[in-house]
Image (cartoon, rainbow, N blue to C red):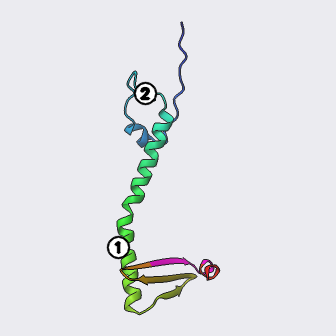
Amino acid sequence: MATAKKKRGRPASKKAASKAPPRLPGTEDAAITEIQNAMIAYVEHRDERMAMTKPEGELKDKLIKAMQKHKRSRYVYQGRVVEIEETPGTVNVTVRKLKEAKADE
């Protein structure tokens, strides 16, 4: 009896293909390389994004301190508006395009 070959999905990138573990006979869902490659690509992208949160938080703190230093709760520059909202125990900052800020008000 002839067996039909199953098509394997193309890897999302060569880097993703190199991280995929080799298929083991008898393992569940081992033939769905498309899902494996998509998962690996997603995880790599997510990890890169998550690595950016620490520098983003530091820059956010720097912006809040600058706004507080100059005693500003709202600042407009180059079509963007920066607003800080202080509540007991927390300070939050938002930066939006000026048109978006006018629509919210």
Q: What's drawn in magenta, residue-wise?
A: 93-100
34 on left or right of 89 = right
Of residue 28 and residue 3, the one placed in the foreground of this image is 28
Q: Relative to 14, is 44 above or below?
A: below
Prevailing SS of the magenta stretch: strand
Q: Amino acid at mark 1?
A: Glu
From the image, state whether disc 1 or disc 2 is nearer to you.
Answer: 2
Dot 1 or dot 2, earlier in sequence: 2
Q: Position of residue 32 (x, y in %)?
A: 49, 31
Residue visible at 36% across and 68% down in the picture: 55
Image vertical order of residue 49 relative to residue 83, above or below: above
Residue lying farthest front? 88
**Picture quarter with the C terminus:** bottom right
Looking at the rendered image, the quarter that the N terminus falls into is top right
Marks 2 and 1: in contact by CB < 8 Å? no
**Quadrant of residue 101 in the image?**
bottom right
Q: Residues within 10 Å of mark 1 (few under 14, many from 20)?
A: few
Residue 23: percent from left, percent from top: 40, 27
Q: Which residue is mark 2?
A: 28
Tell me which amino acid carries mark 2.
Glu
